[in-house]
Image (cartoon, grey):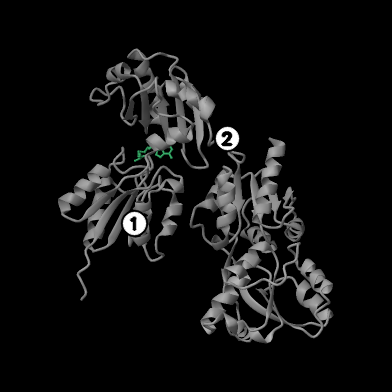
Amino acid sequence: MDKKKIGKCVLAGAGPGDLGLVTLRAKECIEQAEVLVYDYLCNPEMLEWAAESAERIYVGKKAGDHTRSQDEINRLLVVKTRECKRVVRLKGGDPFVFGRGGEEAQALAAAGVPYEIVPGVTSAIAGPAYAGIPITHRGSTSHVTFFTGHEDPSKRESSIDFAALQRLGGTQVMLMGVERLDAIAREMLANGVRADLPVALIRWATTPRQETLMGTLDSIAETVAETGFSAPAIAVFGEVVRLRNELNWFENRPLSGKRIVVTRTRRQAGALTGQLRSFGADVLELPAIRIEQPTDLRAFAELVQDAHAYDWIIFTSPNGVNAFFDLFYKLYHDAREIGGAKIAAIGPATAQRVKDFHLHVDLQPEEFVAEALVREFKKQGGVENLRILLARAEKARDVLPKELSAMGGIVDEALAYRTLPEIGDPNGARQRLVEEGADLITFTSSSTVENFMAMDLPWPAGMKVASIGPVTSKTAREVGLNVDVEARRHDVPGLVEAIGKFYRVRS
Ligand code: SAH
């Protein structure tokens, strides 16, 4: 029986920025959401956890950019929930820490619609932690105060009692109001707080853009003005700030402060992005290409269907393996239908994809280029009269078909997929590249080079080039680029290693 569906609104903490700091419950809610309402402090990457069909509503809320008023947001949540939707309202950090989550919950309660609160990791705690500042410390600091700097301290009705804060001491964490820091510091000094009290400001905490500014109460506002340090930031006042000198773990990683562009397709970017980020890089995922079905899907399907008739099947990329077996298992329900065909794969990632389908890789050249495979076949006595199926992208290089045919092989090319330029800017990376520039761009294939250039973006000043190997480097040089880094091992770990070396040598 069809039970009547009831909507529910989840007020979920989106954490401070680092995706790893989102709770399991929040992630589960996002995955099931039909409507997502979010603002600018939420890392937009978590929106990708949601179903493609989920409605995504941006409600702004950056200071000065109030896309929607709080009343409008409250009404929106109630209306959407009443439509029997699973609504997730994502709020940066924790929903009940200076996030007006209380007001949204009140609106939902007053409207009588079901709701749930999922706490989040607040920037007030995560920010200091990522800056290397323990907010309490045995023997010196046994209490913490959180306060908002949003209020004008000179206002008579200010609810912040700076005299009380002064008496309290301990660690004090201020959210919002960096732009009012001057007035706030003066108010603290006027109430007797020592001029040399250590202060740290942390902006974009827990993200690769995190920056920390240290100072003392009497000079910090000046430093902020001089450096142009801006929101979103939290301020930490207290002795514990000094511990950062010993504990600054996050901003000291090998690639901290480096902005690196990854041009692979969204489906493939994960490993490269993940490894670069784990070394502290600020990664802009800017796929230049996306993978689509081949122009002639029927011709490809016929070759896949006949795969058992070949002596060898050659794969040159993980995409080719995916395309081949996705189709193969639509046609057949038994892996043995592949018959006696042996499998060759170029590159460890390609070989790994074959193994993921529980098939053995019979031949894998040590070098990850077509020429090496040809040499390997020669070593093994050639391919005379052998039937070879080559599964690969449209418009690939013709080294393999040419050389293998010249050796007497009977080669059929199975055009398994095509790469198209990626249009659009779903995660804002293109805009960030244009506005903020980057230190390095990575190319993992010739087509990423060509398609990136085809996007015709202005080349950021000083942006260096890292290439996965000689073939990609050659293409890069042909379009006029200077290749600064080339991987010795032509795969993702090899590229990451080369980039690490490049920066460590120089810094
Ligand atoms: N509910 C949020 C706070 C919302 S108020 C939380 O629990 O974190 C917005 C303020 O939070 C910003 O002005 C800034 O002071 C702080 N903030 C949120 N995320 C931040 C981040 N990643 N880095 C620094 N400050 C942050």
Q: Mark 1 points at which residue?
A: 29
Secondary element at tag 1: helix
**Quadrant of res 447:** bottom right
Task: Say above or below: 149 vs 333.
Answer: above
- Image coords of residue 78 (percent x, y): 22, 55
Q: Quadrant of ligand 1?
A: top left
- Image coords of residue 460 (percent x, y): 64, 46
Q: Is residue 158 visible?
A: yes
Residue at 57% x, 42% y is 280
- Image coords of residue 64 (percent x, y): 37, 40
- Image coords of residue 95 (percent x, y): 31, 44
Disc 1: CA contacts within 10 A as few (<14), some (14-19) or many (>=20): many
**Quadrant of res 371:** bottom right
Q: Which mark is residue 252?
A: 2
Q: What residue type is labelled 1?
A: Cys
**Quadrant of res 285:** bottom right
| Residue 85 appears left or right of 281 | left
Q: Which amino acid does label 2 sit on?
A: Asn
Between discs 1 and 2, the one toward the N terminus: 1
- Distance from disc 1 to disc 2, alpha carbons, whole Å, reads 34 Å
Residue at 33% x, 60% y is 33
